[in-house]
Image: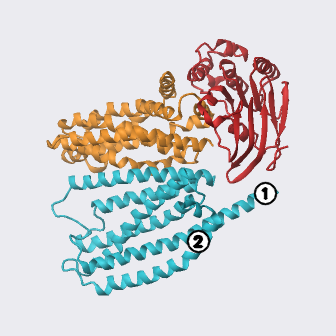
Amino acid sequence: MFAGNGLACVRGERRVFRALDFVVAPGEALVVQGPNGAGKSSLLRLAAGLLKPAAGMLTWNGTPVDADPDAHRARLGYVGHLDAVKPALTARENLAFWTGLAGGSAEVGPALDAMGLAQLADVRAQFLSAGEKRRLNLARLAASAATLWLLDEPTVSLDQASVARFTELARAHLASGGLIMAATHLPLDLPGRALALTAGARAA
Amino acid sequence: MKAFVRLFARDVGLAFRHGGGAGLAIAFFVLAVTLFPLGIGPGPEILARVGAGVVWVAALLATLLSLDRLFQADYEDGSLDLLALTPLPLELTVLAKCAAHWATTGVPLLVAAPILALLLNLDVAGLGALLLAMLLGTPILSIVGAIGAALTVGVRRGGALLSILVLPLYVPVLIFGVAAIDGAISGLGAKPHLLVLGAFLLGALALGPWAAAASLRLNLD
Amino acid sequence: MLHRFANPARFGRIIAAILPWSAGLTVVLLGVGLYMALFVVPPDYQQKETVRIMFVHVPAAWMATMIYAVMAVASATALVWKHPVADLTAKAAAPIGAGFTFTALATGALWGQPMWGTWWVWDARLTSVLILFFLYLGYIALWEAIEDPGRAAKAAAILALVGAVNLPIIKFSVDWWNTLHQPSSILKLSGSTIHASMLYPLLVMIAGFTAYFVTVLIIRIQGELAARRVRALSLGAADA
């Protein structure tokens, strides 16, 4: 159970949101919606610990995340706007690097398969399209043991088949007790609730 | 530990694959050193007199030019966010990247330096001190440079600003690096200067990654 | 004690109250100091009238270092205790420090010319002050280069602390370098011994410069606080 209480976020002297509360339960996807500038990306970065909240607290199963930031980093998988793909490395090498850093195994074949990248495994990433790079980024989630997925516009630039693959991956994750918090404009066919952010004011 | 090695290996591999790493640093180093005889005349006595200083100044500038690839590329493609979220503490991540930077910039400079010293008619007695001083000094340049690079990551035209921030901090390494070589040549001994460089290196290793990580966290915010 | 100054509004009131006093002190101290330096102190038997430049050069160099220390302490306060005005204090102090540094360099050059016939001499103090000048410029440039003021404040604070740690190391290195390359005649711009008749004017000038620093610092902090308020208002207007 991942929760946030009374969160406030300030970016560049501007208050993006304040007094924000949310709860994500296991097996559930919280979809964060709102107009541009409402703070969806900021909220996800805050949840990941990349951003420090101006006020408020994040808790995992009741205990504050601040008490054990290392454990929090270990349990989360973050997919941001950018894909963190090195053009000079192959798809397989890119993925193996990240899973290796997280302490996982170097066997990334199944993860590449899950996102339909098996054919492209040994192609240098500079030759991959934007959608393929996005799939590579998402394949990281398949290869990791992360419980909490924090996703910023996960399906942008994906074709329908890839969206279906991702949805299947996400559903499997939720079915095994995982949690998802995702910011997106596009429809995500996942069990869960929505959190609407309005620009610059208290959240609904 | 394994994660440290993996990151180090990746950065070294990327430096070579992109073709920018060692080759460019050495090329700049040699070019910069070559400018001095062209500028001040080829007289062997003058060159021998300034040789130690010229080699060190060129090494500083070559290191400076290569610093922006330390964090910039990772910042631009989102890798830096992910690196901040791995189990490896950000301080060790910085250290691994500094080590990779040193391996692909400092070590090539170290290898090229004696050859350049001979081009400048440097007294052979100073060569050993030159190698030792650069062995101790180039890692310091990478670590201190990392602090500047971390502060200016994401700043437009950060390269010029980086130079202004970092060059004053390089002055002690320059002074003691040259003093070591001059000490060896004059017979007064390089050891005290090398010891001071060693102390600087220990200080940089202890405090540098911490300052650089704090700066990176700030720019990830 | 810091908490009393933490409230920006109260901080603003306190410094506004101090301002007229520090401004008055500046005028008095600088007036007395300059009078003593120009008219009371006898000309040095070696340097004659040019020794009077010392009464600007030495205090300016002293201020250059002192102000950097102030910036370092303010930066540490901003980073560790997250004091809301400490970062502005450091930002406001920097150009004043840079100005004193430049003054020290310029007066050093002016002093050197009649004595040794050169407009610049690489002695330990001038060289250290020159490097300090670049540390100031780098600090100011960093503030300007980062668009987000909150981020710029923290980055500049880190830089100020890194600089503060390095400053003694740089000074030590330059002093060492100077002894290694010591020319035969000992060039000491500070003069070998300070006679009492020279000491008092020097102290008065230092006190005057300090009062000047406090005065200009307060004015600049007021400017920064006002600018911050304007930004908040315009952002608020944009949201509404």
Query: On the picture, is B25 further left or further right than C112?
Result: right
Colour applied to chain A: red
Q: Which chain is orange?
A: B
The nearer-to-camera label among 1 and 2 is 2
In the rendered image, residue C47, in percent from the top left (x then y), is placed at 22, 77
Is A123 located above or below residue C161 in the figure? Answer: above
Out of C171 and A20, give the one closest to the viewer.
A20
Give me the C-alpha separation between circle 1 and circle 2: 32 Å
Q: Residues within 10 Å of mark 1 (few under 14, many from 20)?
A: few
Quarter of the figure that contains the C terminus of chain B: top right
For marks 1 and 2 on the same chain, the one whose residue lies earlier in the sequence: 2
Residue at 45%, 68% in the rendered image: C99
Q: Is residue B1 above or below residue C121?
A: above
Q: Position of residue A183 (x, y in %)?
A: 78, 34
Residue B89 appears left or right of B63: right
Q: Is residue A116 left or right of residue C180?
A: right
Q: Is residue B132 visible?
A: yes
Q: Is residue B28 visible?
A: no
**Colour applied to chain C:** cyan
Q: Chain of mark 1?
A: C
Element class at badge 2: helix
Q: Residue furthest bottom?
A: C39
Mark 1 sits on what residue? C238
Q: Residues within 10 Å of mark 2 (few under 14, many from 20)?
A: few
Residue name at image x 58 percent, y 60 percent:
C3
Reading the image, the residue beneath label 2 is: C14
